[in-house]
């Protein structure tokens, strides 16, 4: 099946630990995005990448890092520098030249204990 | 930057009722999307509608770009329509989506 997968679905970590969230897509999309959602809020952009080996900071990049070594993959690392990491994280992708319609993965719910 | 406002913030319906959700945006846009977030958090694309009208089953949407608003119509609502409906826009060369705060819909049997 074509689509966007995120793993794990639920993730627990202790304060002070780094953790990496996975996002993979087999849609041959060029651009990929990471968003954060807090309860009762809209989505806020963390990082995005329009081509392999290139990415840009979004509105709330502090305490996060990403890489884009392959077109299909855009992992997000939540570092210990992120002060409030407990949130729902959503990955999206978009095909270049097809407007700006973004499609989303199922999300990862991160809880810091 | 561009602002996106959705109304109403909350809506409760009886199954079978119709509803209209509204999205206002503060500047010209070149993309507008409607999403449904189900109770498990999955964001489902409903419409990509920078202008005009589209229909998909019981749902339809209209964007009047010159007046900077979009409407999402839900007819004959079902309990599975419950969740949060988001409007998101993109303007200019910026590839980022700007999101409203959503309309939380509960459809009771």
Image (cartoon, helix red, strand yellow):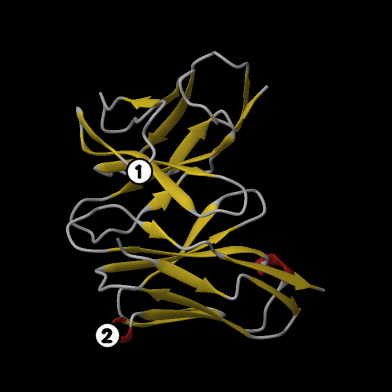
The residue pinned by badge 2 equals B66
B59 to B102, vertically: above or below: below
In the image, B19 versus B92, the foreground residue is B92
* Distance CA(mark 2)–CA(mark 1): 28 Å
Q: Quadrant of the C terminus of chain A?
A: top right
In the image, B107 versus B99, the foreground residue is B99
> In percent of the image, x 45 and y 43: which residue is there?
A1
The residue pinned by badge 1 equals A59
- Asked which secondary structure carries label 1, the reply is loop
Image spot of residue A81 (x, y percent): 45, 20
Horizontally, residue A50 falls left or right of residue B87, namely left
B87 to B38, vertically: above or below: below
The part of the image, by quadrant, that contains residue B108 is bottom right
- Between tags 2 and 1, which lies in front? 1
Image spot of residue B106 (x, y percent): 72, 69
Horizontally, residue A53 falls left or right of residue B79, namely left
Q: Residue furthest right?
A: B109
> In percent of the image, x 66 and y 83: which residue is there?
B76
Q: Mark 1 lies on which chain?
A: A
Horizontally, residue B69 falls left or right of residue A70, namely right
């Amino acid at each position: 099946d074509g689509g966007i997968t995120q793993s794990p679905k639920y993730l627990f970590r202790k304060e002070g630990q780094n953790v990496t969230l996975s996002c993979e897509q087999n849609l041959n999309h060029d651009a990929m995005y990471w968003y954060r959602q807090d309860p009762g809020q809209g989505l806020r952009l963390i990082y995005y990448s329009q081509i392999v080996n290139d990415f840009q900071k979004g509105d709330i990049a502090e305490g996060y890092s990403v890489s884009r070594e392959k077109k299909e993959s855009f992992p997000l690392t939540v570092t210990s520098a992120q002060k409030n990491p407990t949130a729902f994280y959503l990955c999206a992708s978009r095909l270049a030249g097809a407007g700006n319609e973004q499609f989303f993965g199922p999300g990862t719910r991160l809880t810091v204990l | 930057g561009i602002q996106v406002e959705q109304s109403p913030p909350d809506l409760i319906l009886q199954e079978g009722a119709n509803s209209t959700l509204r999205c206002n945006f503060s500047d010209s846009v070149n993309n507008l999307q409607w999403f449904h977030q189900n109770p498990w958090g999955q964001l489902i694309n409903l419409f990509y509608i920078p202008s005009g009208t589209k229909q998909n089953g019981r749902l339809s949407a209209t964007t009047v770009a010159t007046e900077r608003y979009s409407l999402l119509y839900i007819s004959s609502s079902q309990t599975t329509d419950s969740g949060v409906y988001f409007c998101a826009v993109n303007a200019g060369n910026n590839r980022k989506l700007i999101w409203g705060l959503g309309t939380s819909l509960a459809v009771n049997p």
